[in-house]
Amino acid sequence: MPRRVAEFRPHLVLCDMDLPDIKGLEVIRRLRGDPATKSTYAVIPTARNPLEIRTFNREAERLGVDEFVSKPITAEAIGALKATVEARDADCVGSSNRGAEAARG
């Protein structure tokens, strides 16, 4: 994974399946393999039909793809992704705080 990605530590990555130099699932595999990015919410936008997506779904699930989003991506879809990531991040912070409180108390 490029150092820039690990240093930035994104909360969300939209990664196309058919990039020119690398397949989207390979990008996700690399994200998941790096401790700095392993919990990044990974979304694959696709114009493929649901039957084609199922072909990729097993591998995508194994690699930890969190969601597929249909192209073209709408403002509503971006808003829903943002809300999902914010809620997940809040849960993670809450869990960390509860764990720290339990350790202290």
Image (cartoon, rainbow, N blue to C red):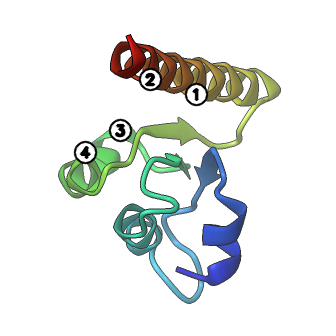
The vertical placement of 75 against 73, above or below, is above
Q: Which residue is mark 4?
A: 54
Task: Identify which residue is drawn at 70% across, 42% down.
Answer: 72
SS at mark 2 in the image:
helix
> Residues under labels 2 and 3: Cα distance?
43 Å
Tag 3 near tag 1, CB within 8 Å: no
Question: Image check: 101 left or right of 60?
Answer: right
Question: Amino acid type of disc 4?
Answer: Arg
Residue 35 pos. (x, y %): 42, 63
Question: Amino acid type of disc 3?
Answer: Pro
Tag 2 near tag 1, CB within 8 Å: no
Q: Mark 1 or 4, which is nearer the eye?
A: 1
Q: Mark 4 or 2, which is nearer the eye?
A: 2
SS at mark 4 in the image:
helix
Task: Identify which residue is drawn at 63% across, 81% down.
Answer: 3
Residue 89 pos. (x, y %): 58, 27
Front residue of 50 and 4: 4
Residue 12 pos. (x, y %): 62, 45
Question: Image check: 5 left or right of 33?
Answer: right
Q: Which mark is residue 100?
A: 2
**Most distant residue in the front direction:** 105
Q: Which residue is mark 3?
A: 50
Question: Amino acid type of disc 2?
Answer: Ala
The residue carrying pointer 1 sits among few (fewer than 14), some (14 to 19) or many (20 or more) residues within 10 Å by Cα, namely: some
Q: Which residue is mark 1?
A: 89
> Residues under labels 2 and 1: Cα distance?
16 Å
Task: Identify which residue is drawn at 71% across, 76% down.
Answer: 4
Question: Amino acid type of disc 1?
Answer: Asp
Q: Which mark is residue 38?
A: none
Tag 3 near tag 4, CB within 8 Å: yes
